[in-house]
Amino acid sequence: MNTRRDFLQKITASFFALPFLTRQGLEDINDHNNEPYDGPLLRVAIMGLGSYGTRVAEAMQACTKAKLAGVISGTPSKITAWQAKYNIPDKNCYNYENFDNIRDNPDIDAVYIITPNALHKEEAIRVAKAGKHVISEKPMALNAKEGQEMIAACKKANVKLLVGYRMHFEPKTLEIVRMRKEGELGKILFFQGLSGFRIGDPNQWRLNKELAGGGSLMDIGIYSINGSRYMVGEEPVWVTAQETKTDRIKFKEGVDETIQFQLGFPGGAVASCLSTYNMNGLDRFYLNAENGFAEMQPATGYGPIKGRTNKGELNYPHVTHQTVQMDEMSAILLEGKQPPLPVDGEEALKDLKIIDAIYEAVKSGKKVKLNL
Ligand code: NAD
């Protein structure tokens, strides 16, 4: 259903597309414009109808290149509610036992996995075997080994694997990346990434090692890990890390509350990052370079993102991240479009290798070498 808000969203999005296109010399990442779209439509089934799945479904109502076409859930009442709200036919509804049958459904192109972290790997492999493209939420898996298995399964099944790195389509982020790429900032010297929030309910899956695979680092710290890579523009070659825990009852063994980590880059830049479940509203990126700086706060929330550089405020209008992400993923999956920043399994694997190394460095207290 198109609403006035959707219309405004599209108009706003087309606003940023122009300066972005001209200045970055990249394709229009959004391609929302006033022309009716008659290209291919990505028909997506969402697996996991929880809090983020609900946000993605809402955002997809404003997509022009992607459509919510199906659901996979273990809760029949949620399926019924989503069917009514989004007009989803019975034949496109599955549960966790029977979703392999999606292979026989010509009306679904891709499955977007939005379940707890520990489930992503097995679910992705089943989706790939069913011959559908896989979109997984971050973290793609619990560790690099699992990530590699997912990549191999998708390759074998000849389907594509993408990961929900919504910031890779965010205009202010991309403008800083453009400035860095085009040398306007000069040599990059330092990145600071602060990512955290104060987590509530002690019984949620995010605090369960079996389902989350860890703690704050898997959930929110990954934004600073990934951000350090696209802001610095290199792959780190070493990591050091330290953990602090103030509440050993809430944050059990293997569930990190707060981790500080440092990354070293081949060009000499260093990153200093904090990941925590114990501080509210921590969401800040700062990049220092020889000829300038870039600063974002909030840097990775749902927006509006705020950013400025030594040249002044970044004034691109706010877009709904998940709307742009899903339209762009449609173009990547169906038309082979190259995104300005990668969102594929190999990209996510690099973050998982860094996560493995951070946990190793916390344990050993030593600098761990990275080979991404
Ligand atoms: P949530 O708890 O709100 O939803 C998870 C859903 O998975 C629920 O509907 C739940 O019923 C379902 N589920 C299926 N099997 C389950 C099981 N065995 N145990 C528990 N739940 C099960 O969580 P969420 O916040 O929607 O997070 C889901 C995923 O999305 C996570 O991987 C998270 O990291 C990611 N996420 C990404 C963003 C982003 O901005 N990209 C934001 C939030 C969450």
Image: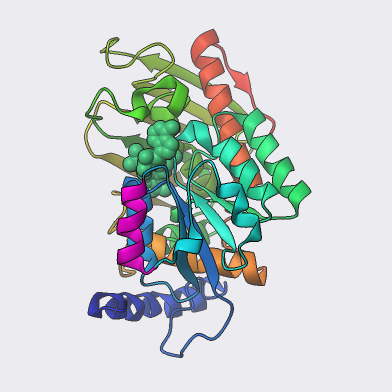
Tell me if residue 365 can be seen. Answer: no
Name the quadrant where ligand 1 sits.
Answer: top left
| Residue 154 locus on image (x, y percent) | 70, 48
Residue at 69% across / 31% down in the picture?
A: 371
Residue 83 within the segment the image draws in magenta: yes
Residue at 33% across / 56% down in the picture?
A: 80
Residue 169 position (above or below residue 24): above
| Residue 204 locus on image (x, y percent) | 30, 28
For this rendering, which residue is in front, 219 or 160?
A: 160
Residue at 50% across / 61% down in the picture?
A: 92
The way the protein has been coloured in the rendering is rainbow
Tell me if residue 106 can be seen. Answer: yes
Q: In the displayed structure, does residue 116 sit left or right of residue 143?
A: left
| Residue 238 locus on image (x, y percent) | 60, 26
What span is colored magenta in the figure? 76-87
| Residue 5 locus on image (x, y percent) | 25, 75
Quadrant of residue 41 in the image? bottom right
